[in-house]
Amino acid sequence: MTTRLTAVYPGSFDPITYGHLDIIKRACQLCDRIIVAILVNPNKSPLFSLDERLEQIRHATRHLPAVQVDSFSGLTVNYARMHNARILIRGLRAISDFEMELQMAHTNKTLAPEIETLFLTTSNEYSFLSSSVVKEIARFGGSIDHLVPPEVAIAVSQKFTPHPASCPSSPVL
């Protein structure tokens, strides 16, 4: 009997980007099962609800049979243990990411010595990309079609498009 290698790729994914998807696809080549797990962080105010983000990720990864999508709160290592995951996947875009990610990996290792952190560097074409960049571009009316899947681009744009009911039809004096 062979043991299936399970990895958890935790994050807020608000929204999921092509950079995230690049990491997920590459992790699928290394592990038998990838759980993309949205961390519910009470200290953050996401643009999308948890249900919206779960659906966006499920839709964007539907062609990857090794991927499961879930959410959790609390310590990532505890979540990983509950799912018999031996690896945490983390993406690195630049040197600036490395210091924080290394500290987190060392901390997780003290909490769960049996769980390894696997760093995957982003592909060059996504080295600048983050969910924050996507939201900032959309906020000012820029195109994000090349940064996120089509259904996510529509959803992000809708979040920043004023609704007719909120726009006065005549100037207010």
Image (cartoon, rainbow, N blue to C red):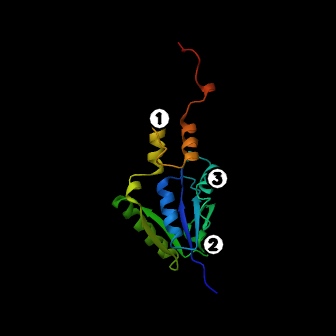
Per the model, the C-alpha gap separating discs 3 and 2 is 21 Å
Label 3 or label 2, whichever lies nearer to me, is: 3
Name the disc covering residue 83, or none.
2
* Rendered location of residue 23, percent (x, y): 48, 62
User: 106 or 5: nearer the eye?
Assistant: 5
Mark 1 vs mark 2: which is more N-terminal? 2
Residue at the disc numbered 3: 55
Is disc 3 surrounded by few (<14), some (14 to 19) or many (20+) residues within 10 Å? Answer: some
* Secondary structure type for disc 1: loop
Per the model, the C-alpha gap separating discs 3 and 1 is 24 Å
Q: Please tell me whether residue 164 is drawn above or below residue 94 in the rendered image.
A: above
Mark 3 vs mark 2: which is more N-terminal? 3
Is disc 1 surrounded by few (<14), some (14 to 19) or many (20+) residues within 10 Å? Answer: few
Cβ atoms under marks 1 and 2 closer than 8 Å? no
Q: Please tell me whether residue 142 is drawn above or below residue 101 in the rendered image.
A: above
* Secondary structure type for disc 3: helix
Q: Please tell me whether residue 102 is drawn above or below residue 154 in the rendered image.
A: below
The amino acid pointed to by label 1 is Gly
Name which residue lies at 61% across and 84% down: 2
Q: Dividing the image into 4 quarters, which one contains the N terminus?
A: bottom right
Name which residue lies at 65% across and 51% down: 51
* Rendered location of residue 139, percent (x, y): 48, 37
The amino acid pointed to by label 2 is His
Is disc 2 surrounded by few (<14), some (14 to 19) or many (20+) residues within 10 Å? Answer: few
Mark 3 vs mark 1: which is more N-terminal? 3
* Secondary structure type for disc 2: loop
* Rendered location of residue 125, percent (x, y): 39, 55
Name the disc covering residue 141, or none.
1
Per the model, the C-alpha gap separating discs 1 and 2 is 41 Å
The amino acid pointed to by label 3 is Glu
Name which residue lies at 38% across and 52% down: 128
Find the residue positioned furthest to the top.
Answer: 173
